[in-house]
Each structure stands twice: as C-alpha cells, then as structure tokens.
Amino acid sequence: MTSPTNTIEYPVLFNTNGLHQLNAFLENTTYSKLIVLVDNKTKIFCLPILKEAIKYSFFFIEIKNGERNKNLKTSKILWEELTNIGADRNSILINLGGGVITDIGGFVAATYKRGIRFINIPTTVLGMVDAAIGGKTGIDLNGLKNQIGIIKNPLALWVNTTFLDTLDAREIKSGLAEIIKYGFISEASILKTIEEMEMDSFPLDSVLIKKCIDSKLTIVQEDPEEKNRRKILNFGHTLGHAIETYFLSKVKKEQLLHGEAVAIGMILALHLSHQIYDLPIKKVDFYTRLILKFYAKKFKSTMGSNNYLVSKLPNITNEDLAYILPLLQHDKKNNNGQVNFILLKEIGIPVLDCQIDNYQIDIAINYYNTINTLTL
C-alpha cells in the first residue's frame, strides 16, 4: 500500500511494500540520464532492492561510507564522475543511502551545472526520519559538520521501511536518537512509545517512522529556511555535533555515530534545561535513563542484519571538553559569536536561542558522566 504523507513542495510518499511507484513517477518525468549514488554498503545491501523495483536503466556512482567522506574531496570526485557519465542539466541523481549520501548527494546535485534534479531514497532510520527531509544538503569542511551547503528540495522523496532490514544493530540505535528527539520537541506520544520498548527488542514500525516524518514536515513547512521554529530540530545537536566532530577527529581514535553523539547531546540539553528553566530534575533523571537504556553494553536488535555487542556511550573527560568547547563556535545557529542552544521549558515546549556558559556545560557533563557510569 502506498500512502502520501504530508507534502511540501515535492511528493513525499511513504511505502512499506516496495518502490514500484517510482516507475510511475519516472514514466511521467522527462530526463536524459538516471544516476544512482550509493556507498560501498548500500551498493551491496540496497542497490539490488532498487534494481528489482524499477524497470528503467541507470548508471551508478559509488563512494566510501561514513561521515569522514562527506567533504570537498569526495564532492570533486562526484562532479567528475557525473561529467564522465555525460550527465547534463536534465539528468536526475537518485541518492540511495543514509544521511551522508543524501547530504552530499543533494549538495553535489544542487551545484553540478548550477543544479540538476535529485531524488532522495533514505535507507537508514536517521535518513528516513530526519536527514533526507527538508532540503538541507551539505558537506563538512576541515572536519566541521555541514559547514558548506545549500537548502534545496529534492524532486521527490520515497521512504521504504524495507531498507531497515539491511541495517545492523548499531545503525538502528543511532537512528533511534533522532526519533526520541521528536518526542522532546513536538510529539510527546513518541516518548510514550519509547518508554514501552525493551532495550533488546524495539520494533521501529512504520507508524512510528511516519509520525516522525510528519512532525518534521510540519515544522519545515512553517519555517523552511530555519529562521525561527525549524531551529527546534537541533535539540541536542549543538553539543552533539561538537562531540561527534571531536570523536571523528584524529585527536580521538574512537568514533561515534551521529545518533550516539546526539543522544549525549540531548542528555546534556535536558540538564541545561533544568539549570536554566527549572525542568524538574526527576524528569531529567527519568529521560536520561530512558535514553541510556538503549546504549548499554549489550544491544540486540530484531531488525538488523546481525546481533552483536556495542560499547556504552563514552564519558566526557576534562581533556575531551577542552577540545569540544571551541568547536561550539562553529555551530550554524550562532549569532554574533554567541552560541545558541535549544532547551526545554517543559517536555514538548522548546525554547530557541538560549545562551549557556561553560560552567553550566561542565555541570551538565558531570551529571551525564555520573548517570552514564551507573547505567548497566
């Protein structure tokens, strides 16, 4: 069954039974060449699904997976590959993958020959509920997240939960952090669903995925250029992005996935909300433990391609913090050198452009480290 979800300037279709509707869309779309962008993982696990679903021939371009490859060097390779294929301004690029693929694919398409059309087909939880929606494209610069980019809507977006069966357990729990975010900023019912999930078995069903998609589309419709309300989607991301950047750097050998860093960032934002807006500490404790229960040492998924052990979220040391704090100066929400946070007056009531000092951040990190250490 194919059902349209909330639309903005392009069709957003939610389909749990295959991608056959893409044939009808392409049949009614004029284009010269069809090119599919994949990484070395989605080439193996997702490209065969796409090949089986659509009847039209296409070229494909492959890049290495991972945030470290979302940069100008990879963009240059993609522009050159499009040129070698003979892509013109009437070509279409299909971005088949997670947030890295839709971010860099959208950016490359928006800039190649001053802009070609692109279609997003997200294959990860994070991509489905967040990264592929809303027109944000971009690449990292010198390790700093999404410093170069443009807001450019895709020609269309297809969300197919079949692709979730290709994910491993760690990728699923990374995407879960973005789902939890919607519960804090707009859809309290999502938190209730998360509360009822078990650590070792949580079905990310189509109802939950679609609820997150509709929530983001509603927010983006109100503020497409992120001048006001759309900023709430960054809850947990101010410190989360800085932590992610630090753990991806050469300074730190251990890497964090985006959702893992955002999970830490949300806990810190909850405690900062307690400090600034008196969010009850009982609620902060409850939701901190709710988040951390999904990041225990043993993690078992019923949907991933395998079940295996993953590490707990790391504590943040004083040495880590010395690197992380300067990275906050590069956050895109900053204004006149002032770092702006998204905090909560209450669950579901976010506050924009909150100013926080380093001492308050230090208190929040000490709180996180204490609870994280105690979590089994």
Image (cartoon, rainbow, N blue to C red):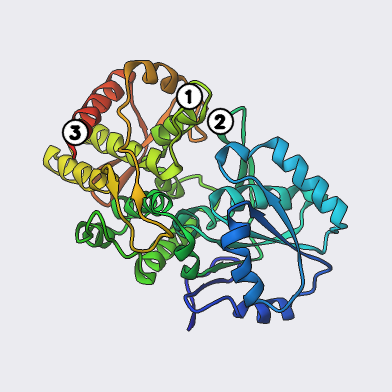
- The 10 Å Cα crowd at callout 3, few under 14, some 14 to 19, many 20 or more, is some
Say which label, 1 or 2, has the lower sequence index: 2
Say which label, 3 or 2, has the lower sequence index: 2
Instruction: Compare residues 248 and 133 and report the one nearer the observer.
Output: 248
Picture residue at 18% right of the left edge, 38% below the top: 375
Say which label, 3 or 1, has the lower sequence index: 1
Residues tagged 1 and 2 counted as in contact (Cβ below 8 A)? yes
Question: Visible in this render: residue 147?
Answer: no
Residue ID for mark 1: 327
Instruction: Compare residues 140 and 46 and report the one nearer the observer.
Output: 46
Residues tagged 3 and 1 counted as in contact (Cβ below 8 A)? no
Residue 14 picture location, percent across and down: 49, 73
Cα distance in 3D space between marks 3 and 1: 25 Å
Residue 128 picture location, percent across and down: 48, 60
Residue 187 image-quadrant placement:
bottom left
Specify the label residue 371 is tagged with: 3
Decide: is 289 above or below 87: above
Cα distance in 3D space between marks 1 and 2: 8 Å
Decide: is 15 above or below 200: below
Check disc 1 and report its element: helix, strand or loop.
Answer: helix
Give the residue type that dot 2 points to: Leu
Give the residue type that dot 1 points to: Leu
Query: In the shown orientation, is residue 130 left or right of residue 116?
Result: left
Residue ID for mark 2: 144
Picture residue at 47% right of the left edge, 73% below the top: 5
